[in-house]
Image (spheres, rainbow, N blue to C red):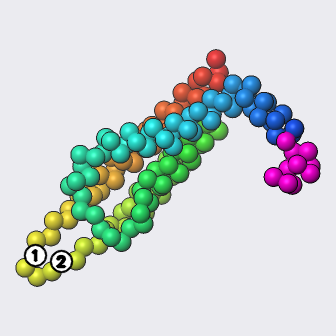
Amino acid sequence: IVWVYMIDGFSRMQMAVSHFANNYNILLKFLGYLIAVGPVTFLIRLLTKRWADDIIETNNSLKDAGKWIGILERVTVITLVLIGQFSAIGFLITAKSILRLIDKPETKIELGTANNFSSRKHTEYVLIGTFLSFGSAIMIGLIINWLMKK
């Protein structure tokens, strides 16, 4: 705060904020990213909740890692749509699919116990979440592009 005061940064910040607040395209992009980070995250969790109970949680994962991966991928996909790099989205989907293929959760099979883990169910669950995430981000990006052309 002292540094900003010394360089007369408050007036510069006020000019920057007023410039961005009056720019329709910047506000539209900001709103799109905000929707992708907040409401879409909640919506995907709500839509996949009924299958989450079928997936046995393994403790070898970071807490909320899936949520953060989803947020980061939506931000990346929206950015790629806004700059018109649709082929890079295909590359991102492919890279994520390969990582998921080699990263199947491990389960311990003990003698005399039933193994309730289903690799197929886990893969289907991840694919549903991935398609919802990528689909919503592509739609948000396309809507933003369409509204900016008006």
Whether residue 39 is visible to the viewer of this picture, yes or no, is yes
Residue placed most toward the observer, 62 or 83? 62
The image quarter containing residue 42 is top left
Q: Which mark is residue 74?
A: none
Q: Which mark is residue 109?
A: 2
Position in image of residue 83 (x %, y %): 65, 38
| Residue 101, above or below 20 | below
Instruction: Give the residues drawn in magenta, as a range.
Output: 1-10
Q: Check disc 2 and report its element: helix, strand or loop.
A: loop
Amino acid type, mark 2:
Ile
Amino acid type, mark 1:
Thr
Q: Is residue 23 magenta?
A: no
Secondary structure character of the magenta stretch overall: helix
| Residue 77, above or below 124 | above
Position in image of residue 122 (x %, y %): 27, 58
Position in image of residue 116 (x %, y %): 16, 65
Whether residue 94 is visible to the viewer of this picture, yes or no, is no
| Quadrant placement of the C terminus | top right
Residue placed most toward the observer, 33 or 124? 33
Q: Which residue is drawn at 54% across and 30% down?
A: 142
Left or right of 24? Residue 39 is left
Q: Residues within 10 Å of mark 1 (few under 14, many from 20)?
A: few
Q: What separation in Å lies between label 2 and label 1 (alpha carbons)?
A: 7 Å
Q: Residues within 10 Å of mark 2 (few under 14, many from 20)?
A: few
Residue placed most toward the observer, 38 or 128? 38
Q: Which residue is drawn at 28% across and 64% down?
A: 57
Q: Which residue is drawn at 51% across and 43% down?
A: 37
Q: Check disc 1 and report its element: helix, strand or loop.
A: loop
